[in-house]
Image: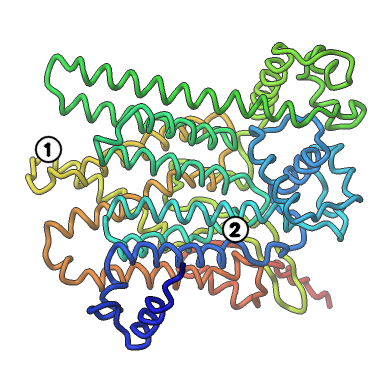
Amino acid sequence: MIDLRFLKTRLAQLRTGKWGDEPLTKVLWRDAALRWILGVAVVALGLFNFARDLNDPPYAFWDESYYVTAVQRAEEHTAQYASHPPLGFMLMKVGRDIVGDGDPKSHFLAEIKKTDTRKIPQTYSYVGPRMMGGLFGVIGALLFYGICLCLTREAFSAFIFSLLYLFENAFIVHFRAIHLDPYQIAFALGGILVWLRAFNDPQKDTWKHAALFGALIGLSFMVKVNTLVLLALTGLTILRDLHRARWPMDRELKHGIVKSAAMLGAFGSVVVGLFVLHTLINPVAPDFKTEAGRRDATYMSAPYKAWLEKRGPLTPGVLWDATSGYFAYMEHDFTGIVKTEKNGSIPALWPVMHKTINYRWDSNHGKTSYVQMVGNVFSWGLGLFGILVATGLIAQRHFQKKVWLDTHEMDILTAVLAMWAIFMGVHIFLGTQRVMYVYHYFAGLILSYMLLPLIYQVLKSRFRAIERQKDFVLGGVCAGVTLCFIWFAPLTYHQPLTRAQCEMRNRPFHVLTCQPKPKPASDDKA
């Protein structure tokens, strides 16, 4: 039964601005209540930033010209191989199923690996597959807010630092498009949050949490493979435990082995399970006379083809062949990618946002609308600042033996910076093997953003002036991130700009070439 008298009492208290015997504002400002209130605010901001105007531009851009073909094959349950694992395409297909915006005229997309965007029917809707990316962008925002809560243990500070994700222009450009990054980053953030909770609390540092971490990184890997490097976080935790332990360390070694086995077992199970699922839900043979069918056929075994064509049984060997063929296709596809390309970026320069990319521009009536891969310059600057300051603090801790730096926050900071360095080292090597783009830095960028609340916590505990002026410090972060986001928002959301307005975005840093380029003046002949 609903106690109407109780409800009337509470409503009366709301009208008077009190809750019980306390002012309502004081109750709402309590950290426990504030966490939920600000969590709702994160979701609301995320929906507004990542999940609006999804059909603008109503044209495919950048990797969408590849992925719309993969989504079409997924819609038709046609077996296929691609440059990346299949989970992202499966989720895009779910978005299209939810919205129900399939186009019967788009079957031709299933027959090719990359389309000329001008050939896509004007009736084609991008909302469904883009919607899932936008929603995963919102999920990622909430997970990053959870990470910031773990790092600061204070709701308001966590909310301010979560703006680094919410107002990151580069994330918004990619996450509200038919790209793989929102799924990869959301699963990676889930894994980082599980790892961080275990790193903070010995009671959560169990094989179960290690298995959950491995499963989440497995899901991220099944979207794009480069987040495989994040598995090193478990190794960093084990190194921390061994460093603290006393000889002979049998207990710590056994615990580390058990956690590693659980993590790798869960990771492997997710990878195998999703490849099997992908094979089973796509039992339609491609047309081997088409361009896409011919390319896939090269890596499909005879038993796999026989099953697809209903000439042979489904066996474990067929599932193995389908999975090994997928890996072979990815390996060959990446091997064939050139190492240099005009939009390619140098991984070592990623922290300074090397090589922004113009994905699309459309001019009309003297104004130009852009889809520009440019990040929040203020936030990227803070990320670089965090890397430099964290390096300095760690050096002081280990070489100058500063006692005030011997804290748990410094342990986390050391692990996060080490993970960032491992990530960068791996990708600098990959940059010698294939072309790399600045958006491959997204996971590293998030690690650099994680350093900022940690540095804030460390310095706040040492310098009372920061604690006294924390509202100004956090307010400055909030203002800088928000204003810079608004400044570059027209480039993020395909909004029209005059040439003068475009050129203003190139001060003080050049971030794009304004279009259309002026025609060279012709020489007049007498």
Mark 1 and mark 2 residues within 8 Å of each other at the beta carbon: no
Q: Amino acid at mark 1?
A: Phe
Residue 515 vertical placement versus 439 (above, below): below
Q: Horizontally, is 516 left or right of 29 in the view?
A: right
Residue count near mark 1 (Cα–Cα under 10 Å), binned few <14, some 14–19, many ≥20: few
Q: Secondary structure at mark 1?
A: helix
Any mark on residue 173, and which?
2
Residue at point 54%, 51% (across, down): 355
Residue 204 vertical placement versus 120 (above, below): above
Q: Could you say which is closer to the camera, residue 460 or residue 38?
A: 38
Residue 367 vertical placement versus 262 (above, below): below
Residue at point 40%, 59% (across, down): 162
Q: Secondary structure at mark 2?
A: helix
Q: Quadrant of residue 77?
A: top right
In primary-sequence order, the first of circles 1 and 2 is 2
Residue count near mark 2 (Cα–Cα under 10 Å), binned few <14, some 14–19, many ≥20: many
Q: Position of residue 198 (x, y in %)?
A: 31, 37
- Name the residue beneath numbered marker 1: 399
Q: Horizontally, is 271 left or right of 101 in the view?
A: left
Q: Position of residue 328 (x, y in %)?
A: 67, 20
Residue at point 32%, 72% (across, down): 28
What's the distance in space between the residues labelled 1 and 2, CA to CA? 42 Å
